[in-house]
Image: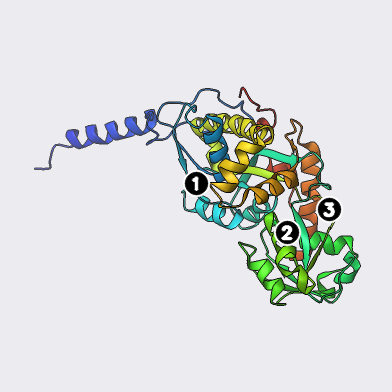
Amino acid sequence: MPANPRPLLAVLLMSVLLAACGQADGGTTQQALAPDAPLPTTVPQGTKLIVGDPPTKVALELSGEIDKFSFPIEWANLSGGPQTSEAFRADALDVGAVAEIPAIHATWTGLPVKIIASRFRKDPLAHPTYELGIAPGVHVKTLADLRGKKIAYSPGQAQGALVLKVLKKAGLTKQDVTLVELPSTGDVYPNALASKQVDVAPIGGVNIKRYTAKFGKDGATTIRHDLRDDPSHLYVRTETLQDPAKAAALREYVAAWVRASRWVHEHPKEWIEGYYVKDQGLTPADGQYLVDLAGEPDLPTDWSQAVARHQETIDILAAETGNRPLKAADLYDLRFQTVRDGA
């Protein structure tokens, strides 16, 4: 005789009911948050964020806000487009801190993402992020002198996009120079310049100061490019924002990020000592140089101008790389643009 099917049927029905109901621990499904729905303001118990934003972690520690979140944060010691995109794909990161290029390249490579926070510099031309380092013995006094030069190039990163923008401003194309693909991490670019592996490379931060101090006696120089290179963003996978609990937590994190950005500017001595000296191992003089270089932050509550500038970058990259054009507005989640100190 066939076995009684009723016990098996009961188990199956119970499984379906449990899957449909969902649980507070995030282990089951819940209704997705629509992209035009208001951001939730309450973070459910059991929610956690994995955040790749090391400088903000230090700022929150120094300001005393690190333990004030209504949910736990797991801090990932990574930054930059390639690392964050890889972590997104591995489902090992919820939010990353980058410049303007990673969101573009992530989208081009089939990883839908959204920008949820934007910071700029009040006077970006007076406080550039990068300058063009010129190798010893190479004659480059103006952008027009870049013709025929070997230029360090890092696709998918801010420095690579800057090179393409500089060429356009100079009335040059990629065919007028030799682009040498090199990673832009650490001292790679300054060392490539010093060894004359390349003639020109965009160098940023304390490397601007150190490069000329170390190799200036040999004829090393830098020149300004006079272009905006100041975007700083937080971005997430689009699917992360479909989780109401994660969206609420991200809203809270963005508000803290805004406060941290202001705190850093308003407490330069504490920032130099706590971040540049103790965390990064720089000298106080280097820290002061970087604080002066950064200037005052601009945290707009209207992203329309930022989106327009981002569109210009996308158009340049699409034309030069052969990738499909994108709408910059599609990269931003405008629900976050007015999130501020009090969330």
Query: Rounded to the nearest whole Å, what is the CA distance between mark 1 and mark 3?
Result: 32 Å
Identify residue for label 2: 208
The N terminus: image quadrant: top left
Q: Secondary structure at mark 3?
A: loop
Q: Earlier in the sequence, mark 3 or mark 2?
A: 2
Q: Is residue 121 left or right of residue 23?
A: right
Residue 227 circle label = 3
Identify residue for label 1: 93
Nearer to us in this view, 93 or 287: 287
The amino acid beneath tag 1 is Leu
Find residue 109 and report its image quarter.
bottom right
The residue drawn where x is 56% and y is 53% is: 85
Furthest residue toward left? 1
Q: Earlier in the sequence, mark 1 or mark 3?
A: 1
The amino acid beneath tag 2 is Ile
Q: Secondary structure at mark 1?
A: loop
User: Does residue 237 appear in the picture of this structure?
Assistant: no
Give x and y (percent) for residue 106.
Answer: 62, 54
Figure check: 317 above or below 284: below
The amino acid beneath tag 3 is Leu
User: Does residue 38 appear in the picture of this structure?
Assistant: yes
The residue drawn where x is 61% and y is 29% is: 255
